[in-house]
Image: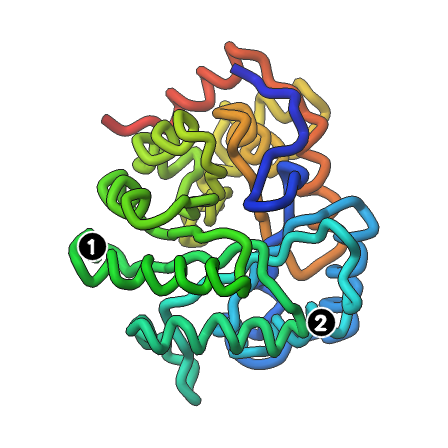
Amino acid sequence: MNSTNDRYRLADKMVRRIGYGAMQLAGPGVFGPPRNRDEALAVLRAAVDAGVDHIDTAQYYGPAVVNELIREALFPYPDGLALVSKVGGRRDKSGAFLLHDEPDQLRASIEENLQSLGAEQLTAVNLRLLDGAPAGQRFVDQVGTLATALQDGLIAGVGISNVTREHLIRALEVTDIVCVQNAYSLADQRSKPVLDECTARNIAFVPFGPLGYPREVHDSVLTNPVVTDIAVGHGATPTQVALAWLLSLAGNVLLIPGTSSRAHLAENLGAASLRLSDDEVTRLTTAFHRP
C-alpha cells in the first residue's frame, strides 16, 4: 500500500510528491497583501531550496498578490519547476469570489496568470468548479477552452478541480487530463472514486485541504488519538502523519500543503520521509471513515 516512489508525472514534468500550495501567502481571507512580505518571499525561496518543484497558485489569490510574490521570489524560474494555476473565478474589490468561467473569461484568466507570473507556459491549469456544477455541455465547452490553450502552447496540461468521477470521464472525452484537484483528507474521503479513477488512468491526484477544512475539522484531525499515537511512535508530528497517510494511498497522489512560515514548510516536507505500515494506514483510514 505504501509507495516509496518520490516523483510522479505532472504534464511534461516529473515532480516530487510534496509540492507547495501558495494560497496562504495572501492576506487574511486570501485577499490583499501578506502580513509579512519578507517572510512570504523567504518561504517561497526556502521551498525551492529544499527541492520543491511544484507550486500551486491562482491569479485570484490576492488577487494577483501571490503570483507577483512568486515572480519576485523565484524569477527566473529554475529548470523543472512546475507552476500550476486554476481558473474559473475572480475576486472583486471587496474580496468576494465571483464566477469567471465563460470560455473567453477562462482564456483571459490563463493569459493573466502568465503575465503576472512572467512565465511563457504553465505546467497545468485547473478548471475549478463550484460544488454541484453539472457535467453537461457547458462543462465540456469549458474544458474545450483549456484544450485550446494547450494546443496554443500556453499550458502543458489540462486539469480539473472540485469534480466528480462523471466530470472526469466527460473531460477525458474532450482532452487528456493531467491532474485532478479535489478535497481529500483523513476527515473527508468522499473523493475516493475519483482518486481510484485517476490511479487507474495514471492521472495525478492533488488533494486540497489535506489536513481537513474548516479549522474545527483540521483541529479534530490533528488531535485524533489514532493520529497522535502513530505520530509519537514515529517521532513525527500529527501533521506529518496526516500527510503521509495521503501519500500512502497511491503513487499518483501529489501534495500541495500550504503555509506562510518556513517552520511549517519544513514540517510539511518532512512527511515525505515518513513510512507508515499497512496496519497504520488502515487504522487511520477507519478512524475517520464515514459510510
Q: Residue at x 67, y 29 (%)?
A: 6
Crowding at label 2, few (<14), some or many (≥20) Cα neighbours within 10 Å?
A: some
Q: Which residue is drawn at 40% across and 63% down?
A: 148
Residue 168, image quadrant = top left
Q: Is residue 100 left or right of residue 204?
A: left
The answer to whether 83 is drawn above or below residue 28 in the figure is above
Crowding at label 1, few (<14), some or many (≥20) Cα neighbours within 10 Å?
A: few
Q: Which of marks 1 and 2 is nearer the N terminus?
A: 2
Which one is nearer the viewer's eye here, 138 or 17?
A: 138
In this view, the residue farthest toward the bottom is: 93
Res. 115 in view = yes
Please identify, in this view, whether the residue under mark 1 or under mark 2 is nearer the observer.
Answer: 2
Res. 29 in view = no
- Residue at disc 2, secondary structure: helix
Q: Residue at x 52, y 67 (%)?
A: 58
In this view, the residue farthest toward the front is: 151
Q: Position of residue 89 (x, y in %)?
A: 37, 71
The amino acid type of the residue labelled 1 equals Gly
Q: Position of residue 115 (x, y in %)?
A: 60, 78
Residue identifier under label 2: 71
Q: Distance between the residues labelled 1 and 2?
A: 34 Å
The amino acid type of the residue labelled 2 equals Arg
Q: Position of residue 235 (x, y in %)?
A: 72, 25
How many numbered callouts? 2
Image quarter of the C terminus: top left
Residue identifier under label 1: 132
- Residue at disc 1, secondary structure: loop
Q: In this view, does 214 lie to the left or right of 15?
A: left
Residue 98, image quadrant = bottom left
Which one is nearer the viewer's eye here, 150 or 29?
A: 150
Q: Position of residue 268 (x, y in %)?
A: 67, 42
Which one is nearer the viewer's eye here, 213 or 275?
A: 275
